[in-house]
């Protein structure tokens, strides 16, 4: 138990140090922008890891909740005069309630049936966002009002770097603490075997639904942060490809590993920026690197590297 507590705090300390040190080596605001994208994507991936890595459930429509959070901070201030910070909370609340209502029927499914059901949900959300152009701007997207807190206008890549970094630290802290609670242990029991968990007296349906709602809340806040940071949002953020990206981040980094979700997000966001020097071969190389990584690191980057370092003699 003490080792787990120490490991948890060590993870938070290392992440905080990385967030604080990186600006010292950034040569321009472009790097602040890329790092902010990493933090936002990592926040959504950490939430999805609760559902997939801890509770063992699949979601191919998670970008739908990301899009709901993003459009909440666009539609709320524009059409209803809601303050952006309040729209973030309302978007998170709406995503959580929707996840609860949608999750009750679809989480009764298993395996590929569950994957297809969540995919259908994500497609439906993206379709609504695209077609309701009077409210969302349609395929062209819409602008987002800037966030103002206590008279301070939150803008600029440098500022959003610290805002998104703080959100990631908070989300990581909550996820790490969750894993050591009775709820977290119930999630792990579900991941190992739903039948065994049910025999042990765990309410399988309730805990699966809890994991789904938690993951939706994470995605909604991450979507709101991205929309406020960019000042613009488009339906692509709620699309199927974005859902696949989020799942890839979690699997690539290591299912069940909070650190792995952050590493997976960092790899998937920064690697395309590096590969732009190869121009038309960029996407082919990105796909090849991911394939090779999964072949030689089947458990994900972080668990595989941790296991290999543990095997080295002292």
Image (tube, grey):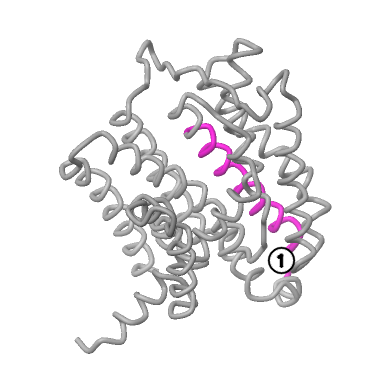
Specify whether 25 is left or right of 231: left
Please state which of residues 296 and 110 is positioned toward the viewer in this rendering.
296
Specify whether 275 is left or right of 232: left
Specify whether 76 is left or right of 195: left
**Position of residue 97 measured from the top left corner of the image (x, y, whole percent):** 72, 37
Residue at left offset 63%, top offset 70%:
191
**Position of residue 276 measured from the top left corner of the image (x, y, whole percent):** 36, 51
**Element on which disc 1 rests:** loop
User: Would you identify the image quadrant in which residue 140 lies?
Assistant: top right
Q: Which residue is mark 1?
A: 202
**Position of residue 155 measured from the top left corner of the image (x, y, whole percent):** 36, 22
Q: Main secondary structure of the magenta part?
A: helix
Residue at left offset 53%, top offset 36%:
221
Q: Is residue 258 placed above or below 240 in the rendered structure?
A: below
Residue at left offset 43%, top offset 68%:
289
Q: Per the image, is 202 magenta?
A: yes
Specify whether 269 is left or right of 116: left
Name the outermost residue toward the front. 280
Q: Quadrant of the C terminus?
A: bottom left
Q: Which residues are magenta?
A: 201-225
Residue at left offset 62%, top offset 63%:
55
Please state which of residues 131 and 78 is positioned toward the viewer in this rendering.
131
């Amino acid at each position: 138990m003490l080792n787990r507590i120490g490991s948890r705090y060590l993870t938070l300390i290392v992440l905080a140090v990385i967030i604080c040190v990186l600006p010292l080596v950034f040569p321009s605001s472009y790097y602040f922008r890329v790092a902010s994208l990493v933090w936002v994507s990592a926040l959504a991936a950490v939430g999805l890891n609760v559902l997939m890595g801890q509770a063992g459930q699949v979601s191919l429509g998670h970008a739908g909740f990301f899009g709901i959070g993003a459009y909440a901070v666009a539609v709320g201030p524009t059409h209803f005069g809601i303050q952006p910070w309040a729209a973030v909370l309302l978007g998170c609340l709406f995503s959580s309630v929707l996840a609860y209502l949608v999750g009750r029927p679809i989480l009764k499914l298993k395996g590929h049936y569950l994957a297809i059901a969540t995919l259908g949900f994500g497609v439906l959300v993206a379709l609504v966002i695209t077609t309701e152009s009077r409210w969302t701007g349609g395929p062209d997207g819409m602008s987002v009002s800037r966030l103002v807190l206590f008279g301070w206008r939150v803008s600029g890549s440098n500022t959003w770097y610290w805002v998104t970094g703080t959100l990631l630290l908070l989300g990581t802290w909550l996820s790490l603490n969750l894993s050591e609670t009775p709820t977290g242990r119930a999630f792990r029991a579900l991941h190992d075997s739903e039948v065994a968990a049910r025999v042990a007296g765990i309410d399988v349906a309730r805990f699966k639904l809890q994991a789904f709602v938690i993951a939706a809340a994470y995605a909604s806040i991450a979507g709101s942060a991205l929309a406020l940071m960019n000042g613009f949002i488009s339906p692509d953020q709620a699309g199927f490809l974005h859902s696949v990206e989020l799942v890839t981040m979690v699997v690539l980094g290591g299912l069940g590993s909070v650190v792995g979700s952050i590493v997976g997000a960092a790899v998937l966001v920064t690697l395309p920026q590096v590969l732009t020097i190869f121009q038309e071969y960029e996407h082919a190389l990105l796909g090849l690197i991911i394939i090779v990584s999964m072949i030689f690191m089947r458990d994900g980057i972080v668990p595989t590297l941790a296991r290999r370092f543990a095997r080295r003699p002292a």
